[in-house]
Amino acid sequence: MVAPVRRKMCESDARHLTQRNPRAAAVSIESVIVLKHLSKAALAACLAIATLVPVAQASSTQTTFFEAPRDLTAPGSTDASRTAAFADFQTLGVKALRINMPWAGVAPTPDSATKPTFDATDPAAYNWGNYATVIDAAKAKGWKVLISLSSPVPKWATAAHTDYVTRPSADEYKLFATAASKRFGGPSVIWSIWNEPNLPTFLMPQVSGGKNVSGTIYRGLYIAGRDGIIAGGQASPTVLFGETAPVGGSHDGRTYPLAFLRSALCLTTKYKLDKSCGTKLTVSGIAHHPYQFSNSALKSDDVTYRNLSKLPTFLDKAAKGGAIQAKAPIYLTEFGIQSKPDRLLGVSQQKQLELRARVEREAYANTRIRGFSQYLLTDDNSTGTCLSCYGGFETGLRLAIGDKAKLSFKAFELTLDAEPSSNKNSKKVSLWGLVRPATGATTVVVEKRTSSKGTFKTWKKVKTKSNGAFTVSDPTGGTKSQYRYRWTSPTGKLTSPFVDVIPTPKA
């Protein structure tokens, strides 16, 4: 067995942690080689569409949140980068943002072990900085904003006052949440508690005495945070639970997401509520990050886009056991496809746009999933061109070097997926698209060519739904066809990138 490949996270400022590392998941050299040389059919198999959430009525109200810390809020972001980002959002049809707000990034004297004297429920006591600028701008546009109140936390708010993530005080967190609620609360705001609490990067300890304790710590933080948001004036807030990372079990001590949720929801191994641990929780939804950066085998308590059906199955068991309400909605609040120039884990730009579209299509097809997401507008900074120089996320729509748009930029604006029939004897191809900037029902012109060397020709005019989504079937498409579509926007004529027909994997 080849040792897992990892690269240390950039932590020049532990209070912000704006760059994170997809290599933190256990990834073997063999699996990376497999991923980089996948055929079109094998890439499709990675999606394991048959194991995604069972299809329900398509959602016309699902919200897609866009998260762009490098451009909007991180140290190094500027008024110019924010202006450029909002201009891109306008082009892309973005209507909702996710803001990951680290407590230590806004609290007074976060590096001190001693709490300063201040009213921690008073918004004026905090330096909201770029977060206020961006949230206020988004709200002024009528956009939804998902605010994740997360770590790192002030040293004075931890048990030992020596770091930024170990045993944060739930009482202090409630006061912070109250201040944030007073400052930013409103009908367009959704809240979530923490970010990836099953990772030691964001919450410690994960394990103590051989047992998971991060779930118990998180449960206390969730209850305190929700109470604080209500105390801040939000009578019936939408507050999401979880924000879990997709995989666990690597050498850095991360907890498998479903194991973490069992602990946080006070569930026994038989999915019964352990009343000595706690009572039924009120949750507005479950937030999860379904990344998968390699073709490595998943463990039973991992949840990525390849085996997403595990999450609603788990939640249904938790509801039956009395831990949460039935049919709790799911929000996929952070997601992206790692692409080149990451030479180790990145797929081509063409595969990035095709995989991203397929996963969004599957999410859109189920009303249980209320939120989808795109993590990063601009890729994280690289440290060169070597094999291991990309220690952050290259899931963005723009390259870090040169700020050049990837193919996925236009594909996010004009999304398209082409899926063949599950019947191997059929040439039928099902197309799903989303004209994201559309403000009402509109018409697109789908074009088709029967081979990669052919010429695109007009195939069919299709009217979209009011949210810009459309579905149409080509009975004679075949697996070698490629598709794209034209759309006339208020500012001119646009054409989507073409997509291949990605074969559906066997169940």
Image (spheres, rainbow, N blue to C red):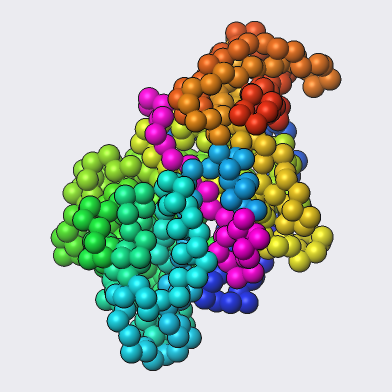
On the rendered structure, is 229 left or right of 347? Answer: left
Q: Can residue 71 be seen in the rendering of this structure? A: no
Residue 437 at x, y = what percent? 56, 34
The span shown in magenta is: 54-83
On the rendered structure, is 435 left or right of 213? Answer: right
Q: Residue at point 29% right, 75% down?
A: 121
Query: Which corner quadrant of the image does residue 153 belong to?
Result: bottom left
Q: Can residue 2 be seen in the rendering of this structure? A: yes
Q: Quadrant of the N terminus?
A: bottom right
Whether the magenta-drawn stretch holds residue 423 is answered as no
Query: Which corner quadrant of the image does residue 14 belong to?
Result: bottom right
Q: Residue at point 55% right, 64% down?
A: 73
The total number of labels drawn is 0
Vertical relation: 71 (above or below) 40: below
Q: Residue at point 60% right, 8% down?
A: 475
Residue 265 at x, y = what percent? 27, 57
Query: Which corner quadrant of the image does residue 310 belong to?
Result: top left
Residue 419 at x, y = what percent? 59, 23
Q: Residue at point 23% right, 41% down?
A: 326
Residue extending furthest toward the right: 453
Front residue of this view, candidates 81 and 140? 140
Residue 120 at x, y = what percent? 31, 78
On the rendered structure, is 17 left or right of 144? Answer: right
Whether the magenta-drawn stretch holds residue 65 is answered as yes
Residue extending furthest toward the bottom: 114
On the rendered structure, is 139 left or right of 317? Answer: right
Vertical relation: 440 (above or below) 72: above
